[in-house]
Image (spheres, rainbow, N blue to C red):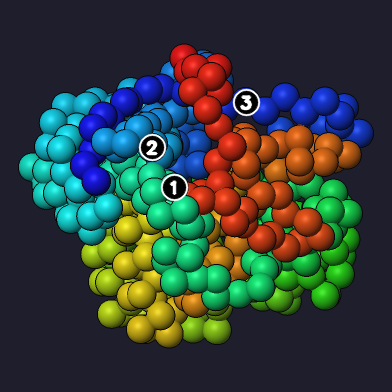
């Protein structure tokens, strides 16, 4: 079956819950600290880059018989250009079932301008659409095409600052972000300890707690924070330094060997994970299936991890059906993360679904839809409604 058409669009997904939150989401109270926050004047002057108007890129890949698959990612503007200018002309007329070959074509086409970063977001959009299409053509859920299911249900954790609400929703594990970075000095370390200590007291000792620094620490600050927080029994420390600082990862591994370490949402394509696995830089890989090159790439990363005894917990894996299907199928994947759009206190998770057909976490566990492809319950009218 050949690819007849690849349509590239920009979309926005903004679920509008009908239930009114009991209290405002705490993410506004504790903003996660990002590398750019070193330059606080950019915030004060209202110039911060997070207000970028890049929308989400999405593609609809249609086969000769009219069956189509849908994929999406982030950073619409430049990602759409990469897909339209470089991928589409080379993929039209190719066998739509040949996901390995098509992934390889996209990686090779991107080599001249860098296949990681924005290019791998572009590869992800197309690859996810191709897997959705393949599942629909074969009338099977994608997790079966990947060799799953491997587990009865996926154990999920919630990321954010509303731990009381997450406990009410039935989560048995939760992750905080660090609102304070090295630029906040000793005062920031004390405030971070207070946040972690209060959270541990709130959730008790039978709930797993993790901490994510969003690549904003340096080696010295990571070591200091982890030593300070050791009494609170963090399950892992995540994304503590810049994704490219391989020597930094080695150094931290050596200086705090007792700390379980996790990273990978800003590593793209399997090679970065293979290098990290070879040096055992971290214990848990966290690729994002919508950023790392799609299902084809994430499956390779899972196989690399499994062969090295490293576990995988896909970044935001429970937010969309793509990560849900991957997590259900892969033995290397142990847990699932719900991050983007965990609801405000009192708002049911069902009301936060961004793509119709997405399975919802119930009492801390998730089972993906068994409908063909990724089980998306969308039609052309829905796509038109989210296009910008
Ligand atoms: Mg993270």
Check whether the beta carbons of the residues at disc 1 and disc 3 lie within 8 A of each other. Answer: no
Residue furthest to the left: 112
Label 3: how many residues lie within 10 Å, few (<14), some (14-19) or many (20+)? few
User: At x 35% / y 32%, what residue is drawn?
Assistant: 66
On screen, residue 87 versus residue 148, left or right, reads: left
On screen, residue 134 versus residue 199, left or right, reads: left
Task: State which mark lies toward you, 2 or 3.
Answer: 2
Q: Which residue is mark 1?
A: 136
On screen, residue 157 versus residue 90, left or right, reads: right
Q: Which residue is mark 3?
A: 14
User: At x 88% / y 39%, what residue is drawn?
Assistant: 346
Mark 2 to mark 1 CA distance (whole Å): 7 Å
**Location of residue 89 by image quarter:** top left
Tell me: residue 182, above or below residue 58.
below
User: At x 71% / y 75%, what residue is drawn?
Assistant: 233
Q: Earlier in the sequence, mark 1 or mark 3?
A: 3
Check whether the beta carbons of the residues at disc 2 and disc 1 lie within 8 A of each other. Answer: yes
Q: Which residue is mark 2?
A: 67
Residue 88: image x %, image y %?
19, 32
Q: Secondary structure at mark 1?
A: helix
Residue 385 or 274: which is nearer the viewer?
385
Mark 2 to mark 3 CA distance (whole Å): 27 Å
Mark 1 to mark 3 CA distance (whole Å): 26 Å
Residue 300: image x %, image y %?
32, 67
């Amino acid at each position: 079956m050949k690819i007849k058409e690849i349509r590239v669009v920009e979309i926005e997904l903004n679920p509008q819950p009908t239930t009114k939150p009991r209290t405002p989401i705490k993410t506004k109270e504790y903003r996660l600290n990002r590398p750019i926050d070193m330059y606080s004047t950019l915030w004060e002057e209202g110039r911060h880059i997070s207000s970028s108007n890049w929308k989400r890129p999405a593609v609809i890949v249609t086969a000769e018989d009219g069956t189509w698959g849908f994929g999406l990612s982030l950073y619409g503007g430049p990602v759409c250009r990469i897909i339209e200018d470089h991928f589409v002309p080379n993929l039209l007329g190719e066998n739509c079932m040949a996901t390995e070959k098509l992934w390889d074509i996209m990686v090779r086409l991107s080599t001249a301008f860098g296949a990681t970063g924005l290019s791998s977001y572009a590869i992800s959009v197309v690859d996810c659409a191709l897997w959705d299409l393949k599942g629909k053509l074969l009338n099977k859920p994608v997790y079966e095409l990947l060799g799953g299911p491997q587990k009865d249900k996926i154990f999920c954790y919630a990321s954010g600052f509303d731990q009381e609400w997450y406990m009410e929703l039935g989560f048995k594990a939760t992750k905080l972000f660090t609102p304070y970075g090295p630029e906040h000095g000793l005062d920031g370390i004390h405030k971070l300890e207070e946040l972690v200590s209060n959270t541990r007291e709130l959730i008790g000792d039978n709930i797993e707690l993790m901490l994510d620094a969003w690549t904003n620490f340096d080696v010295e600050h990571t070591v200091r924070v982890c030593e300070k927080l050791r009494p609170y029994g963090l399950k892992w420390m995540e994304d503590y330094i810049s994704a490219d600082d391989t020597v930094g990862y080695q150094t931290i591994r050596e200086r705090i060997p007792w700390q379980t370490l996790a990273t990978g949402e800003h590593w793209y394509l399997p090679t970065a994970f293979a290098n990290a696995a070879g040096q055992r830089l971290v214990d848990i890989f966290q690729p994002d299936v919508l950023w790392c090159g799609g299902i084809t790439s994430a499956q390779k990363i899972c196989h690399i991890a499994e062969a090295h005894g490293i576990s995988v917990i896909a970044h935001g894996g429970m937010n969309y059906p793509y990560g849900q299907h991957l997590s259900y199928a892969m033995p290397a994947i142990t847990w699932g993360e719900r991050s983007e759009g965990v609801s405000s206190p009192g708002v049911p998770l069902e009301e936060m679904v961004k793509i119709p057909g997405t399975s919802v976490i119930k009492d801390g566990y998730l089972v993906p839809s068994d409908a063909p492809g990724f089980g998306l319950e969308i039609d052309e009218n829905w796509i038109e409604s989210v296009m910008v």
